[in-house]
Amino acid sequence: MVPMRLGARKRRPGIRRTLTTALLLGVLALSPVAVARAQNAAEEHVAAGLAAYWKLHFHEAEGHFRAAVVADPRSAAALYYLGYTVYKIAEPRRPNDPGKARAAELFARAYEIDPGFTPGWGVPGRP
């Protein structure tokens, strides 16, 4: 028997199988049904975020828009509205507030995803 060095780890024989299973489950999560659910969740969070935004509850709106981005990272609307809300939170602060730079990054990501995006601001039929 060979003594084990201090700090050395034992190899677990099932780790490769566990990683393979996790990878397969991740691929299955990208099914069309899962994508549609994510988009619906994102749309619901965007709608809730806009409702909070119009009540001037910017931090609440930010939470909804962040949840929308988590649900659908390719949602230009979620990224745009998150950017605008981050800007509104940073607006009363100093001119070079980091929140304003973060808002610019979010706007850029939104238009990178959908260059023709036009915000609807809660108008029915528009994002």
Image (cartoon, rainbow, N blue to C red):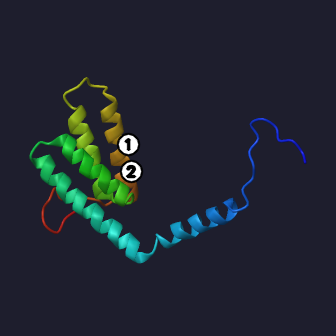
Image side of residue 94 versus residue 122, left or right: right
Label for residue 126?
A: none
Q: Amino acid at mark 2?
A: Arg
Depth check: give the residue in front, 54 or 125.
54
Q: Residue at x 30, y 27 (%)?
A: 97
Q: Is residue 106 above or below residue 40?
A: above
In space, the residues marked 2 and 1 are separated at their CA atoms by 6 Å
Q: Residue at x 31, y 26 (%)?
A: 96
The residue wearing badge 1 is: 105
Q: Is residue 51 above or below residue 126?
A: above
Q: Are marks 2 and 1 in contact (CB under 8 Å)?
A: yes
Depth check: give the residue in front, 17 or 48.
17
Q: Which image quarter: residue 127?
A: bottom left
Depth check: give the residue in front, 86 or 26.
26
Q: Is residue 110 above or below residue 35?
A: above
Image side of residue 28 versus residue 89, left or right: right
Count residues near mark 2 (Cα–Cα under 10 Å), then give few for <14, some for 14-19, many for 20+.
some
Secondary structure type for disc 2? helix
Total marks in image: 2
Secondary structure type for disc 1? helix
List the single residue furthest toward the front: 1
Label for residue 109?
A: 2
Q: Position of residue 28 (x, y in %)?
A: 50, 73
Count residues near mark 1 (Cα–Cα under 10 Å), then give few for <14, some for 14-19, many for 20+.
some
Q: Position of residue 70 (x, y in %)?
A: 37, 55
Q: Residue at x 34, y 30 (%)?
A: 98
Q: Position of residue 81 (x, y in %)?
A: 25, 50
Residue 45 in sight = yes
